[in-house]
Amino acid sequence: MALEIEEKIKELKSKIEELKNLSENKNIDLTFEINTLENKLSSMEKEAYSALSPWDKVSLARHNERPTSLDYIEKIFDDFIELHGDRCFGDDSAIIGGIARLGEMALTVIAQQKGRSTKENVKRNFGMPHPEGYRKALRLMKQAEKFKRPVICFIDTPGAFCGIGAEERGQGEAIARNLSEMAVLKTPIISIIISEGGSGGALALGVADEVIMLEHAIYSVLSPEGFASILWKDSSKAKEAADIMKITAQDLLKFGIIDKIIPEPPGGAHKDMELMANSIYEELKNSLYSLSNTPTDQLLFRRYQKFRRLGEYIE
């Protein structure tokens, strides 16, 4: 899914490239024309991406070229070793997890993983975890607690899988248990919504000491399409739903649902993955230093109070 403005930007970039090739091949001085178009491109990008609507952000969050969890794991961490299985039913490719290092610090990394191609998405179940995925995640969290490793969660899912098999194996119970256990896990937890955080499927990795969102990510109780289907019986009104759901990082920061926003490169994370990964690395490094120096009882108290305050009713 691409933004309309991206097509115009793409056309302008193509024109600039044509002029550069013409100038080089024909030995014609087109410096003024090229500079004029480049300035226009810069202004267009700045204006376009500084005033995105909620639906625009939905489109960016779902962009096929947007970096996935594995992309960030490869760029940010050293010596990542993936661990498999929930020791109960099996493995789930929609959730990956294992141990890694950030600098000299040992960590447990857990992430929801989408694919880019149809083949990858089928393998990853389009980023929609089964209950065994959540139980695998919890197993790794308890392991992290035992060995005093902080936990980093990357959230990127449209929601938990709602197939018959998933329900038969206790999807709701698996999500609820994760919420309960994460609330009292005796080690620092940081959760980052990197693209799409949908429903309880996202929240099952979202009970953390710090909840962080990328600038153009979304986080909601359900998708705009689902919201429109329930409220208006018409999924085609998803754009209108996105406008009133308050699903953007900016809205959620105002409400205190999340703690921080990490800025994205102009045009979105997919425009400069190296820069985006470096920004996440720096944020993790700073947050981990603070959380790792917080006494465990204080860490748990703050985490409990953080989520108790959500949705507080004031007359």
Image (cartoon, rainbow, N blue to C red):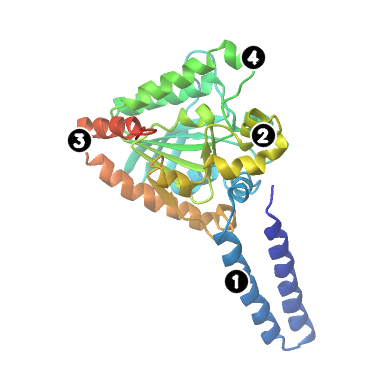
Looking at numbered disc 1 in the image, what kind of residue is underneath it?
Answer: Ser
Q: Position of residue 291 (x, y in %)?
A: 27, 41
Q: Secondary structure at mark 3?
A: loop
Q: Position of residue 31 (x, y in %)?
A: 67, 85
- Could you tell me if residue 313 is visible in this image? yes
Looking at numbered disc 3 in the image, what kind of residue is underneath it?
Answer: Pro
Which mark, residue 279? none
**Mark earlier in primary sequence (4, 3):** 4
**Mark earlier in primary sequence (3, 1):** 1
Residue drawn at point x = 61 percent, y = 62 percent:
48
Looking at numbered disc 2 in the image, what kind of residue is underneath it?
Answer: Asn
Q: Secondary structure at mark 4?
A: helix
Q: Is residue 112 above or below residue 277?
A: above
Cα distance, mark 3 to mark 1? 48 Å
Q: Secondary structure at mark 2?
A: helix
Q: Name the front one of labels 2 and 1.
A: 1
**Mark earlier in primary sequence (4, 1):** 1
Decide: few, some or many residues near mark 3? Use Cα within 10 Å; few <14, some 14-19, many ≥20. few
Decide: few, some or many residues near mark 1? Use Cα within 10 Å; few <14, some 14-19, many ≥20. few
